[in-house]
Image (tube, rainbow, N blue to C red):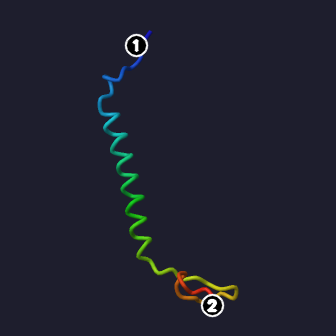
Amino acid sequence: MTPKPTRSAWPFLSKFLGFIVVLFIGILIGAYLISRQVDPVILDDHGNYRSGGHGSAR
């Protein structure tokens, strides 16, 4: 029988998973900050461009 791997057998695993979590959160924050500066182009029912989604309600 082989012994089960213990936490001390994989000391890099918690650091690696922590790095992945921090990287994921950083990507989410970066995407949020970039998306706030974007001026969206919205198409109407006929495919014509309408500029901006904010304050262009009729």
Residue nearest the observer in this picture, 28 or 8: 28
Horizontal side of 11 relative to 5 (left or right) equals left
Q: Amino acid at mark 2?
A: Asn
Q: Is residue 54 above or below residue 5?
A: below
Residue nearest the observer in this picture, 21 or 10: 21
Q: What residue do we see at 39% from left, 46% from top?
A: 21
Secondary structure under the numbered disc 2 in the rendered image: loop
Q: What residue do we see at 41% from left, 76% from top?
A: 37
Q: Nearer the viewer, mark 1 or mark 2?
A: 2
Q: Amino acid at mark 1?
A: Pro
- To which residue does mark 1 refer? 3
Residue 6 x %, y %: 36, 20
Which mark is on residue 33?
Answer: none
Residue 5 x %, y %: 38, 20
Which mark is on residue 48?
Answer: 2
Q: What residue do we see at 52% from left, 84% from top?
A: 52
Residue 2 x %, y %: 42, 12
Figure quadrant of the N terminus? top left
Residue nearest the observer in this picture, 50 or 55: 55
Q: Residues within 10 Å of mark 1 (few under 14, many from 20)?
A: few
Residue farthest toward the top in the current orientation of the protein: 1
Res 18 quadrant in image: top left
Q: What residue do we see at 33% from left, 45% from top?
A: 19
